[in-house]
Amino acid sequence: MIWNNREYALSLQMVSMLRGDNMNTIVQMMENIPFFAVFTASEKQLLAEHGHCFELFKNGEVIIQEGDTQDSSLFIILTGAAFVRKDEYPEHIIAYLETGSIIGEAAFLVGGRRRMASVVAQGLVNVFKLDQNAMEQFDCSFQLKLTKQLVVIIVERLEKMNEALAEIMG
């Protein structure tokens, strides 16, 4: 995806706005992402306030680096697209990700776990980043609710992998 100067400027403006005090904008963006559907308005507000940062990645920039054990943050793509690849085979795309995709959930749930693949921006990508420090600020019931949502995502991905494997095995 190629972005023109106007799109790039709008994306930078959005990141600047998100880094400011415009919590309503952040919560509105969350409304459009299925992951957040189970959360109440006040819980979304809490996430928006404690989310560690919003980052903008340019085309080709690495969002998550395979093998990294230092950063166990969770990322949610707010706008844009990315792809997943193994560094050993950089020309083979494992998956394409779009707005609303959750990435880095395994390392986030099991801190210090090695990242299993690299995620690379395809065009401009705005992400919401949540790290363990922010997670620890939430009460236990909210942490459990967030964790359950991530487990659902992992189980759904495992089911897709099993279906794909069964199809290959014939």
Image: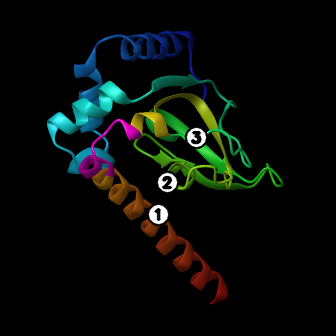
Q: Amino acid at mark 1?
A: Ile
Q: Give the residue displayed 68% in from the left and 53% down from the top.
A: 114
Question: Residue at image x 24%, y 51%?
Answer: 141
Residue 140 within the magenta-colored segment of the rendering = yes
- Eye-nearest disc, 3 or 2: 2
Residue 44 appears in which quarter of the rendering? top left
Q: Tag 2 or tag 1, which sits nearer the N-term? A: 2
By what rule are the colours in the image chosen?
A: rainbow
Question: Mark 2: which secondary structure?
Answer: helix
**How far, Cα to Cα, is label 1 from label 2?**
10 Å
Above/below status of 22 relative to 140: above
Q: Residue at x 59, y 29 (%)?
A: 123
Q: Which mark is residue 109?
A: 2
Q: Quadrant of the N terminus?
A: top right
Residue that numbered label 1 is attached to: 154
Residue extent of the magenta highlight:
136-143
Q: Amino acid at mark 2?
A: Leu
Q: Give the labeled residue for mark 3.
A: 82
Asked if labels 2 and 1 touch by Cβ distance under 8 angstroms, the answer is yes
In the depicted view, which residue is nearer to us: 113 or 13?
Answer: 113
